[in-house]
Image (cartoon, rainbow, N blue to C red):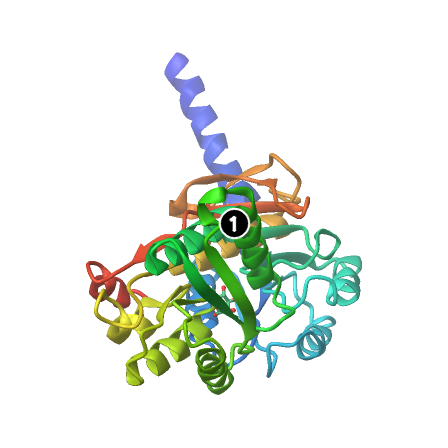
């Protein structure tokens, strides 16, 4: 008798299970647009490949779109073109903190879920931000690298992306606050923040201009993969005494990394993880598993469970992990990955 009841229950569960949406894949039938900062930047291509693979494995589809340049205007045009094409969600790396607000609010008003990754638009412009590594953690790693490579004192400069770049500006602000708050850094002098606009030639020209202007410059810190690769080549080709650190792709930095090269060591984060986590967060917004509110949790596939926390700008974010250091010991291995 007992056995009969049990098998009837199991049978019912199987029938229900077959029809239940709880058994559907996380991204079933979803249409998602992923918008990077600009075309031709390997950083976004790597993140997009992992994002797309993740969504497709869950039964959804991804359209990747890039503005021609890393400007707010070009990105607004790209976003305007996507709204009205029946997307369930847009995930964007913002070229400007505030300038995208109108277009992203328009998207949300039309029922499109808006997440961001890499570079956050302001809290009103997004539901949640996937932060590759805590903003303060990145700022701390970069200022400590400058301090260490400069030997604790002397001039250093920052070679950034565009002057509006939300993520670069947040990291630079974090570096400045850390410097101001701790006497340890008082002998380090930040002489200039230069902008290479995430364009290789402009970044090379800015590197050359910095060296000319500041002959005693000890370190350049480039918190951009495009900037650091251009500066690394310029410094090494010209046998400059000025050293380099920042955020880079191991595959683009392999020739320039090591104590006897232009860049002793630099940082980035798990690139495949960034694409994956951004994909799971975006799919979870579409299914309604999360809304982007503080303290919500969700499962990001084999990355495990994540909790939504408060970002420095008082919006919400999901932090992937810690910045990773790349040096002569691990660069070859890591360059195979990204
Ligand atoms: C460049 C972009 C990107 C940034 C990396 C470190 O590729 O500016 O937004 O996260 O560098």
Q: Position of residue 41 (x, y in %)?
A: 47, 77
Q: Is residue 217 above or below residue 14?
A: below
Q: Quadrant of residue 257?
A: bottom left
Res 33 visible: yes
Judged left or right of residue 133, residue 38 is: right
Q: Quadrant of the N terminus?
A: top left
Mark 1: give few (<14), some (14-19) or many (20+) Cα within 10 Å: many
Q: Is residue 127 above or below residue 252?
A: above
Res 283 visible: no
Q: Is residue 290 above or below residue 207?
A: above
Q: Quadrant of residue 295?
A: top right
Judged left or right of residue 145, residue 106 is: right
Q: Quadrant of the C terminus?
A: bottom left
Which secondary structure, mark 1?
A: helix
Q: Position of residue 133 (x, y in %)?
A: 47, 50
Residue in front for this viewpoint, 37 or 57? 37
Judged left or right of residue 212, residue 233 is: left
Q: Residue at x 55, y 43 (%)?
A: 181
Q: Quadrant of residue 161?
A: bottom right
Q: Position of residue 311 (x, y in %)?
A: 61, 45
Residue in front for this viewpoint, 185 or 169? 185
Residue in front for this viewpoint, 12 or 75? 75
Is the residue indicated by label 1 positioned so its CB lies within 8 Å of ligand 1? no
Q: Residue at x 22, y 59 (%)?
A: 330
Judged left or right of residue 125, residue 51 is: left
Which residue corresponds to mark 1? 179
Q: Position of residue 61 (x, y in %)?
A: 53, 66
């Amino acid at each position: 008798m007992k056995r009969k009841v049990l098998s009837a229950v199991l049978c019912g569960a199987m029938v229900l299970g077959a029809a239940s949406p709880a058994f559907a894949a996380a991204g079933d039938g979803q249409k998602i647009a992923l918008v990077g900062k600009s075309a031709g930047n390997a950083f976004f291509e790597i993140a997009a490949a992992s994002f797309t693979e993740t969504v497709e494995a869950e039964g959804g589809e991804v359209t990747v779109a890039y503005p021609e340049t890393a400007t707010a205007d070009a990105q607004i045009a790209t976003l305007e073109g996507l709204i009205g094409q029946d997307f369930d969600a847009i995930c964007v790396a913002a070229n400007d903190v505030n300038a995208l607000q109108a277009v992203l609010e328009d998207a949300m008003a039309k029922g499109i879920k808006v997440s961001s990754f890499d570079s956050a638009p302001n809290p009103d412009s997004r539901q949640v931000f996937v932060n590759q590594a805590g903003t303060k953690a990145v700022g701390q790693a970069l200022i400590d690298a400058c301090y260490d490579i400069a030997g604790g004192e002397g001039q250093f400069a920052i070679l950034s992306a565009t002057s509006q770049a939300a993520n670069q500006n947040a990291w630079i602000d974090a570096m400045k606050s850390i410097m101001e708050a701790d006497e340890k850094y008082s002998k380090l002098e930040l002489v200039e923040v230069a902008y290479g606009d995430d364009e290789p030639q402009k970044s090379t020209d800015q590197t050359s201009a910095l060296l000319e202007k500041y002959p005693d410059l000890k370190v350049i810190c480039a918190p951009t993969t495009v900037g650091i690769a251009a500066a690394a080549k310029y410094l090494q080709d010209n046998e400059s005494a000025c050293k380099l650190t920042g955020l880079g792709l191991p595959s683009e930095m392999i020739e320039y990394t090591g104590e006897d090269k232009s860049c002793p060591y630099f940082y980035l984060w798990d690139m495949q993880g960034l694409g994956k986590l951004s994909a799971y967060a975006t799919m979870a917004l579409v299914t309604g598993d999360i809304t982007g509110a503080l303290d919500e949790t969700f499962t990001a596939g084999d990355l495990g469970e994540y909790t939504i926390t408060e970002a420095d700008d008082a919006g919400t974010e999901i932090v992937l992990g810690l910045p990773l250091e790349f040096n002569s010991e691990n660069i070859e291995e890591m360059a195979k990955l990204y």
